[in-house]
Image (cartoon, rainbow, N blue to C red):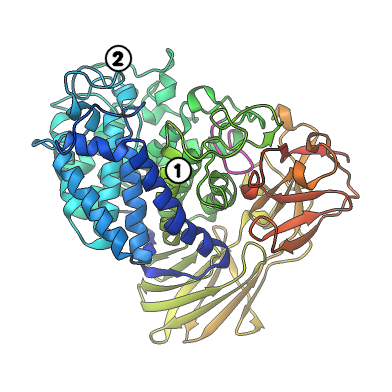
Amino acid sequence: MMDYPIAPVPFTAVSLKDLFWRSRLETNRTVTIPDVLSKCQENGRIDNFRKAAGLMEGPYRGKMTFEDSDVYKVIEGVSYSLAQEYDADLDSQLDRLISIIAQAQEPDGYLYTNRTIDPGHPHVNAGPQRWSNLVMSHELYVCGHLYEAAVAHFQSTGKRTLFEVALKSADLVCRTFGPQGRHDVPGHQIIEMALVRLYRLTGCHRYLDTALFFLEQRGHHENRVPYAYEGNPGYCQDHLPLVHQKTAVGHAVRAMYMYCGMTDVAAMDRDSVYARTIGYLWQAILTHKLYVTGGVGARHIGEAFGEDFELPNLTAYNETCAAIGSVMWNHRLFLLEGEAKYFDVLEQTLYNGLLSGVSLSGTRYFYANPLACDGSFKFNSDSMTRQGWFDVSCCPTNLCRFFPSLPGYIYAVREQDVYVNLYIQSSVRLETGSGQVFLSQSSNYPWESSIQITVRPVSKTRLTLLLRLPSWIGDQSMGSPLYPFGHPVSSPVRIALNGEPIAFQVRHGYAAIEREWVPQDVVSLDLPLEVRRIHCDFRVLENRGKTALQRGPLVYCFEQIDNPIPVDTVSLRSTDVFTACYEPDVLGGVTVLKSENLTAVPYFAWSNRGEGKMAIWVLDGA
């Protein structure tokens, strides 16, 4: 079976010991997952499965048709967490929930609670028959999240209970849609990449064929009407066949998930035109539509991309789910091409536009992640701070499934090449073309940039260790021409082997060290971690004459609570010098940036101390 040329090291092989991320994953496991499970129960999402199974009386409860997907995402998050740290009570709770879901499934595999509960009177967005009004009913989207959860549960626990439910559903989808069946496409994408995951595990080619069919049908309207929102087929990326799409348009989350599916298919067929298409799309986002936080999606209306260089700060949408989708897509692009530039975007998104989506407490969430707050515009579902839940609760449940999967993004292997993509303190067992190797990584990243990697091959082994050289040491933030740095770093990258400086080659953005490794070899990497000013392309109108601050992968912001003057009037002079200072009692322990009169905090941590003004981009006083 052809697949990605680079193999990610599974999260189950990685032991996370990182000070920065370990506490966040632990909060997710002990606080966020129980909170989200409780909210799913309180808001009727779990009871909907009981009603569909005939275990409970009553109508479908929920404002949206796709609320089953929240339950599936929680199952995925719990499954990943169980693999990291086993919890017998949580495992049993999951078993009971999966049993209810299995009973809710109809005999032919159909599983969509709002129609099963009352097929004669489904939710208004569901349409009168199965698979009708797919633009908004999200029947296929819900299936996709079921399959993602089922794969995670099977891989994490070895149990097939949910996996069999997923296969039965997928077989129905494959019988229903295809060249000889319905020519519809998913309104909200995700089933495409979920079907590829089923194909990887089963080798059943019809799952891959159906994923490709859904992608190929988009933009073709010979057998159906175009999918549109307020008359705009670009909203669903249904305006053109995919191979003719050269820039990102429409609903940002749908786009990110679709690009993931396209990249999966490109990995299965190296000659696929999708490989070229996703290259165009990625470059278009990097150079025209990417926020400095890594966020995507400028507009609240349609949760959509804007025009080129349309990147407002106050009204930026930047949905948390879109940030998660971007991380998933950039990871796939790296696995396909092996270039560090994809992890440069991934890392900045991870530490900024994604992490900002959840409070330090783990129980309050951002749906939108703007780059400014004026104390008036209620950007987050009629609020100016995080909320405990939403009518559309995709972001909280998406976060709880993403965080425990994070260890699977750190390392990757291709034959004798070992990639270290994220500097997160951890240990890992790797299978390389030269045999088994153990790595351990020690650091206090992102607060400090000194990293030590200990290499322990089972026996003397020749391989190439590839250490990502992050774009934040270069000329442009994320390597994007939108965001040039104001000055170069003042010191070079330093790499030592067993205490002695060592020469290295730069390969596709990585420091490549090729040698015969022996047990207890230690590589030390020292990156120039400095406070850097970011400028912005003059075509981004709102940022003309403004500047922002970045240190390492972290973008900083000015919160009103820390500063004596209104943050929307802050002006940074060229003589203003900011000093980095770790403050253990501020925002759970962060490095703040201080000048004579101003204080900046990491963007991900803003709005944890009540409502107030905030700004990333401030006046450049020159």
Residue located beneath label 2 in the image = 225
User: Image height check: is 223 above or below 441?
Assistant: above
Q: State which region is magenta.
A: 289-297
Q: Is residue 229 above or below residue 366?
A: above
Q: Which residue lies furthest to the front in this view?
A: 57
Spot occupied by residue 341 in the image (x, y as percentages of width and height): 55, 51
Residue 107 got which mark? Answer: none
Q: What is the crowding at mark 2: few (fewer than 14 residues within 10 Å), some, or many (at least 20)? A: few
**In this rendering, does residue 229 appear at all?**
yes
Image location of residue 202, percent across then percent down: 18, 53
Q: What residue is shown at x 72% (from left), y 66% (from top)?
A: 492
- For the residue pair 169 and 81, the one nearer the viewer reads as 81
Q: Looking at the rendered structure, which numbered label has been put on residue 396?
A: 1
Identify the element where label 2 is drawn. loop
Kind of residue indicated by mark 2: Val
Give the structural element (helix, strand or loop) at label 1: helix
Judge depth for marks 1 and 2 and give the one in front: 1
Residue 171 in the image: x percent, y percent? 14, 39
Query: 543 and 87: which one is in front?
Result: 87
Residue appearing at x 60%, y 27% in the figure: 308
Q: How far apart are marks 1 and 2 (CA)?
A: 33 Å
Quadrant hosting residue 114: top left
The quarter of the picture where the N terminus appears is: bottom left
Disc 1 marks a residue whose amino acid type is Pro
Q: In this view, does 181 lie to the left or right of 341?
A: left
Is residue 296 magenta-colored?
A: yes
Q: In which quarter of the image is the C terminus?
A: top right
